[in-house]
Image (tube, rainbow, N blue to C red):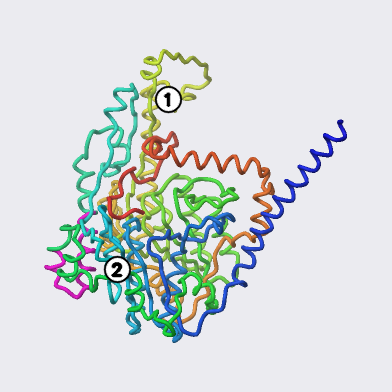
Amino acid sequence: MRRLGRFFLVTLAGIGLFVVLAVGGGIWAYSAMGDKIEPRLPSSMVLSLDLEAQFREAPSSDPFDAFSGKRAYVLRNVVAAIDAAATDPKVKGLFATLGGGGMPLATAQEVRDAIFRFKASGKPAVAFAETMGEGGNGTVGYYLSTGFSQIWLQPSGELGLVGYSAETPFIKGALDLLGIQPQMAGRKEYKSAIETFTETGYTAPHRESMEALLESWANQTISGIAQGRRMGEDKAKALFGKGPFLASEALSAGLVDHLGYRDQALQAAGDSGKKGELVDVAAYGAHLSKSGGTKVAVITGSGAIMRGGDDNAFGDNDSFASATTAQAFRDAIDDPVVKAILFRVNSPGGSYVASDTIWHEVGRARDAGKKVVVSMAGMAASGGYFVSMGADRVVAQPATITGSIGVFSGKMVLADLWAKLGINWDGVKRGDNADMMSANKPFSPQEWDRLNRQLDAIYADFTNKAAKGRNMAPDRLEELAKGRIWTGSDAQARGLVDALGGWDVAQAQLRELLKLAPDAGLELVSYPKPLSPWRKLAKMLGGSGGGLTEDEGMRALLQAAKVVAPLTRQLEAASPRAGELRLPPGSTPLGSTP
């Protein structure tokens, strides 16, 4: 009987191992052969682009993403494909679908600029929407659509050109009811992250900062609409914020060109029988040959900045690990063929120490003779600005959220909450400040002094390095700091940013620094180099010290964490670390979501 049991166990184990290897092998084969099994491109085609899909700063390393069914684009690959298509005689037109307003305004600007360059070739660029907003905010989507030569709207749809708004939660009242006392400090008055816990509404500096952000975004959007629709700016301003418009109203106002359905819009783009077969932009881009020329390392930092490396086998696109990023810089510095580094940053900030680690590597690269250009995406603020400010050139989109030169720290004191719950704590310690960050007691005067000395030192370090990096007098830098956020256009006007634009402008800056011709080729190579499909599979199966079961359990926990994220997002800011260079929760206005 025992032998029979063992036989069944061995058989089941063998079947399980076979399934794991079969699935893993399938993932590996799909990833490894993906480019090779792409069908050949037709001799005549119309490119399609789904503007409601997710846009990423770098490819996902999650081997399961290929089977998720969710469309996702790598932003720089889309821009490169659209630019290549402009001069490709096989491409007859461009057709895009859009609808919602979930794309950050800065991302919309990057894609829109590429559409304008494509349109300049004389080829049709057609945007179609069933609706723009559908009862919500379609402002960014509509702004993006104005880059196309034709805008089609379904007769039953609407155009949600309603403008931008900002709403920030303030939970002080709830904390008071619960008996939770926030003890937090920031540098300086515009560093509003702590105010969601300590105030019941906007302070004057916080409101001033948010008002300026919305004003800048509104002006950029109005100018873009006027440019794209070839209407007077006064008319565009009069229409801005007056939506949602019925389809017929949008047509009468000149906001759209045609009312119709997808098949009709598709014909306008050139996809009618033999004129052009529909090909997705990503599939087209996969066939583009790599351009030769001067080798440039591309390093991408996206998400909250934290210490350590990225040990996630599934590739977390929302983490910006200092050890991984610093190693990428070291590899690029040590590679004699690499002449420059293009550092793409999309981050609200994070750990001061981690940010400083990356800042140091940027300086080392410059000292080694490698030119460094930062390209800011939707957000490069606080710690995101810290890692950027030491580059040779800093490029941002007009709508990029940047600046926020400041720091905060503190803790939540739960002593009164425990008393209400009938819970008592006791403990022992060695050292006056050993329990300084304990949530069970307030700061002592000595501890509070220590915390504020840390914040003063961090703020002084941040501002001194920013002034040096931007070649600015300390007094002038201080006027622009104090924790205040700026749009890219406002930051550029004040010397915090060098130029406005996206990947194309960043590459132009590199050519200028390298003294190359404006049309000289650049070979962009990602650092660190992506893991091979086989190494991804090995890591997933336990190559990094964890078994498949552990990884699946962690994956399940991460999925569960996403469900409760809205409840914990505000408390994230109450970090017990020495200093946080981070934007406040809820600082992103509605209508543009970084």
Q: Which residues are magenta?
A: 214-237
Q: How far apart are the alpha carbons under marks 1 and 2?
A: 50 Å
Query: On the image, numbered disc 1 is attached to which residue?
Result: 439
Image-based side of 11 in relation to 271, left or right: right
The answer to which image quadrant residue 118 occupies is bottom left
Quick one: 385 or 73, which is closer to the camera? Answer: 73
Q: Quadrant of the N terminus?
A: top right
Between marks 1 and 2 in the image, the one whose residue lies nearer the viewer:
2
Q: Which mark is residue 14?
A: none
Which residue is pictured at 34% across the width and 42% down the height? 585
Vertical side of 173 occupied by 254: above or below: below
Task: Indicate the secondary structure of the residue bearing disc 1.
Answer: loop
Q: Quadrant of the C terminus?
A: bottom left
Image-based side of 1 in relation to 418, left or right: right
Disc 2 residue type (three-letter): Ser
Quick one: 274 or 436, which is closer to the camera? Answer: 274
Residue 427 screen position, x and y as percent: 51, 16
Residue 489 screen position, x and y as percent: 27, 62
Which residue is pictured at 52% across the width and 42% down the height? 558
Q: Residues within 10 Å of mark 2 (few under 14, many from 20)?
A: many
The answer to which image quadrant residue 270 occupies is bottom left
Image-based side of 506 in relation to 11, left or right: left
Which residue is pictured at 81% across the width and 41% down the height? 10
Which residue is pictured at 21% across the width and 56% down the height? 163
Disc 1 residue type (three-letter): Ala
